[in-house]
Image: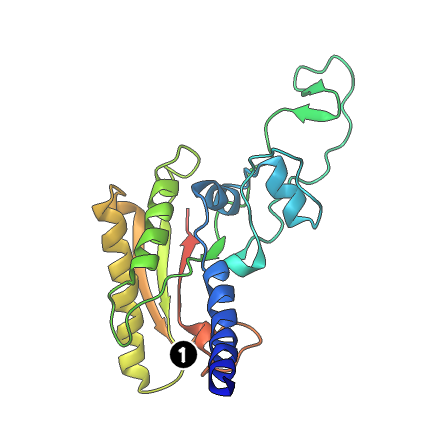
Amino acid sequence: MRKLALSLLACGAVSIPLAARSQDDAPVSPEDFVCAFAGECGDGAADEAGGGNAAPGGRGPRISATRGFSLGSTAPSARPPRRPGNATTPQRRGAQVIGPRRPAAASGQRVNLRLAFETGSARMTPAAAAQARIFARALQMPQLANMRFRIEGHTDAVGNRVRNVELSRRRAQSVADFLVALGVSRGRLEVRGHGPDRPLPGTGGASAQNRRVEAVRIS
């Protein structure tokens, strides 16, 4: 009986981090990428990103720090009041302003795609392939269809630097090839491998968090 209790306790200790990992790696929606790269975010996403509660039934994209996004200031900034009768004055419905959103910056937005690979390989895991498919759908949405991106591979600092740089480049190329196979124009993508040279701020070079592939908007 005592052995059975110890066995159940050990299983419970293992299952907790696995459950937390599955939540962190949950796929995002194509709308999340549109929000990150084009600055067109649903009201629900804006509320959540700002720490508020999304309206019941809202369908805005869900964005959180656990999903690898670094959005910066993508929310529209306050606009000066316009005089009545101005042709560019947005229409109003109650408290909601209906009008064009302020466009995001021309380039530089960066998103961690949260893709995992087999150890020492450029082969994506099945979960990573599912995530990459979501990104491919986002790249074909009207808001992103005319944008170009650089796919950047990064590794930790464990092992030989030259090999890590090459591995990071192969992983980035693998992601780009996968996106092209799903219909994304190859001319919209650049590939670069940085190896261990660009660790995430606040992390040590050997941290596993540095093993990542990022998409960077370049135009």
Label 1 sits on residue: 156
**In the image, 85: left or right of 215?**
right
Q: Position of residue 81 (x, y in %)?
A: 78, 27
> Considering depth in this image, is 137 or 218 the residue closer to the camera?
137
Note whether 133 is above or below 174 in the view shown: above
The furthest residue to the front? 1
> Considering depth in this image, is 35 or 149 the residue closer to the camera?
35
Q: Position of residue 8 (x, y in %)?
A: 49, 77
Q: Residue at x 51, y 74 (%)?
A: 12
**In the image, 210: left or right of 160?**
right
Colour mode of the rendering: rainbow
Q: Residue at x 24, y 65 (%)?
A: 123
Note whether 31 is above or below 84 in the view shown: below
Mark 1: give few (<14), some (14-19) or many (20+) Cα within 10 Å: many
Please name the amino acid that badge 1 sits on.
Asp
Q: Position of residue 109 (x, y in %)?
A: 50, 52
Note whether 145 is above or below 164 in the view shown: above
SS class of the residue under badge 1?
Answer: loop
Q: Position of residue 122 (x, y in %)?
A: 25, 68
Residue 112 occupies quadrant: bottom left
Q: Residue at x 66, y 15 (%)?
A: 87
Residue 95 occupies quadrant: top right
Q: How many marks?
A: 1
